[in-house]
Image (spheres, rainbow, N blue to C red):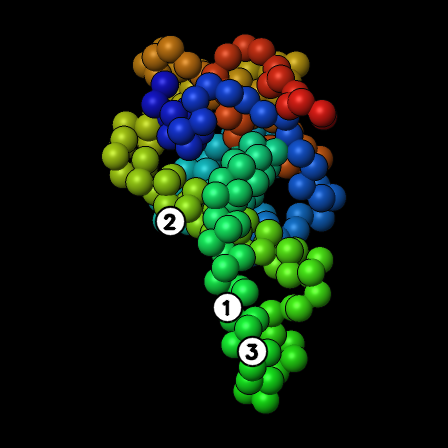
Amino acid sequence: MRLVIALSLCAGTVAFAQQNPGDPDEPQRRFGVGPKLKTFPQQTAKKALASAIDAIEKGDVPYLLAHLLDPGFVDFRVDDRSKQYEATIEVELARVRDLQTSNPDRYRPEDRVPTDRAKFAALVAERSRDRAFRQLVSDMQEKLRDDPQAFKDLKTLLREGTFEDIATGAKVSHPDVKNRALFLSKIGERWFLENRHEDAPPPKMPGM
């Protein structure tokens, strides 16, 4: 099903173990995106799917990625992609730091790039993750534009699909949506769309 291809962001059919995004009963900002539980409810699998469709229709792909897709999968993708930005961002921040050091009176202390090695490395990692998340948003937007059938499949599943309780959460299928079903899982009191299309639990990543 093209839906899974779009949601998996070129990750193939690999599924990843979920990582705890914090206290699930107290949703936190993720990637600078705050939770909107009244606008995009997730109390049931069906509501979570409806919220994903609503987010796409409103053009709020950042929210879809930050709060409606499996957080472990999104975190893994962001962490993996952020590595390719670290060297560039380190050079950029080092240049800014050198400029600020040469002109200390022109910058407020709170606006300066840290000179402490550990704090500088933490800032590089943070900026790299931010850039990686923005790139994932761009990738998702492009895939949804290039494959409108994926979004139509989502609507078909919500409107006419069969929601089935399974050991790992919920499965949604419809005879007109060929080959693959949509899976959702529950973390705390919220439901999330998974990145898998088979009747098997997601394998845990090494070391988890």
Quarter-of-image position of residue 100: bottom right
Q: Nearer the viewer, residue 84 or 136?
A: 84
Q: Are marks 1 and 3 in contact (CB under 8 Å)?
A: no
x, y percent for residue 193 = 52, 30
Disc 2 from disc 3: Cα separation = 41 Å
**Residue at the disc numbered 3:** 100
x, y percent for residue 64 = 48, 42
x, y percent for residue 44 = 59, 32
Quadrant for the C terminus in the image: top right
What residue appears at the point 53 percent right and 37 percent down from the top-left corner? Answer: 80
Disc 1 from disc 3: Cα separation = 9 Å
**Residue at the disc numbered 2:** 58
In the displayed structure, would residue 162 be above or below residue 208?
above
Quarter-of-image position of residue 108: bottom right
The amino acid pointed to by label 3 is Gln
What residue appears at the point 71 percent right and 58 percent down from the top-left corner? Answer: 118
The amino acid pointed to by label 2 is Lys
**Residue at the disc numbered 1:** 95
What residue appears at the point 60 percent right and 69 percent down from the top-left corner? Answer: 113
**Outermost residue, bottom side:** 105
Secondary element at image label 3: helix
The amino acid pointed to by label 1 is Arg
x, y percent for residue 157 = 41, 23
Secondary element at image label 1: helix
